[in-house]
Image (cartoon, rainbow, N blue to C red):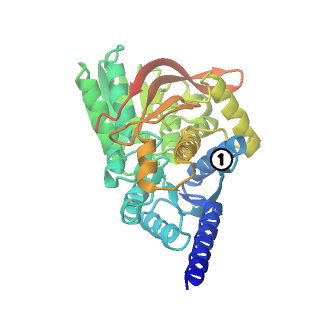
Amino acid sequence: MNLIKLFTSCAAAISMLGASVANAQEPIRIGMALPLSGVFTSYGQQAKNGIQVFLNKHGTTVAGRQIEIIYRDTGGGSAESGHRLAQEFVSRYKVDILGGFLITPQAFAAAPVATAAKVPLFVMLAGSSSVTEKSPYIVRTSYTNAQMAYPLGQWAANNGIKTAYSLVADFGPGHDAEHWFKKGFTENGGQIVGETRVPPANHDFAPFVQRIKDVEPDAAFVFLQAGDASIGFLKEAAGRKLAEAGVKTLALEGFTDDDTLAAVGDAALGVISAGFYTTDYDIPMNTEFLSGFNAVDGGKLPPNFIAVAAYDAMRVIYSALHELNGEVDSDRLIEAARGMQVDSPRGVLVIDKETRDAVQDIYIRKIERVDSGLVNRNFDKIPMVKDPAN
């Protein structure tokens, strides 16, 4: 009987050991929800390229565990697709980590799924401040609109701009940007002399640019969607000689990224913006990142802030997994990410210990022409800015 018990005990131990080894060999699955078609396709491609740059440099193994990335197309910016894909990743693909969710409604919709399943969710854009409040499992490596708009308002008021006109898209992110620019500007002595909210689908900016010109402010703060809207405004502003009338254009990250500059040319010259990344940033890690991005993309698409946010999300994930020796324990992984500091093509990124949001230098940039074309040239910096809304 004792021999039978011993045999049974040994067999059970061997079975458990086999299960443990099998589990150790299981890949760590990351479900990436990105807009790979539709109006936000360039956003998704930027993120995907940024992820691939990181994988090319750091490999697809962490602490002995293989990394498997599963991409799915959100097809645009709808909340429904964010919720559906988050559920699909968790229930069908049994992912260990969620990532992407670039558009705010999608991040909001994925949050309760991440909370219920206790799966970490790394948001790589989605600029509304409240995103990280929607789930204790969210970490964001990009920025918030408030984090850009508030210091830009402060900088403007303290650098000779006394009056400003606000023109923003009439949706949540536009309202956030409007509020925080006004707050930073007026708290430092600036005066808002006009405000207009335009429908997000609007592409005709002739009457709005003329209204700004008629008011004669020192500057126009403009928050519009990247792409057709920002291109339309810049072309109309150039056609109506807004800059020649003494009106500076102030904007946030993304309004004049390299995609936009290629489309509008010299119409973008002189635009001042606040942002955390520019290809013109002269540090070794950015030089390396640019080279890696070019190798991935073949020079078709210059990298922007979304690519950097995706690259840095992978860095935070890898660093946390190294710290946990490859074990995917959601609560411990989020705890490892809290307060983490990593070197980045943007400079330094810190994940705020309390809010799980990005803390970073915010640069004040101006569009200038250089030998290689138009660039956002950094000329001032506000160091290590936290999201003022949190």
268 sits to left or right of 140 = right
Q: Quadrant of the N terminus?
A: bottom right
Q: Nearer the viewer, residue 166 or 316?
A: 316
> Would you name the residue on which mark 1 appears?
49
Residue 297 image position (x, y, % from top left) = 73, 45
- Residue found 57% across the figure and 63% down from its top: 73
Residue 8 in sight in this render: yes
- Residue found 35% across the figure and 44% down from its top: 174
Q: Nearer the viewer, residue 335 or 260?
A: 335
Q: Nearer the viewer, residue 80 or 41?
A: 80
Residue at the outermost front position? 2
Tell me: residue 189, above or below residue 7.
above
Q: Residues within 10 Å of mark 1 (few under 14, many from 20)?
A: many
- Residue found 64% across the figure and 64% down from its top: 21
Residue 13 image position (x, y, % from top left) = 58, 71
Residue at the outermost bottom position? 1
292 sits to left or right of 231 = right
Residue 194 sits in quarter: top left
Q: Quadrant of the C terminus?
A: top left
Residue 198 image position (x, y, % from top left) = 35, 47
Residue 361 sits in quarter: top left
Tell me: residue 96, above or below residue 267.
below
111 sits to left or right of 376 = left
Tell me: residue 218, above or below residue 313.
above
Residue 170 in sight in this render: no
Disc 1 residue type (three-letter): Asn
Residue 357 image position (x, y, % from top left) = 39, 40
> Element at badge 1?
helix
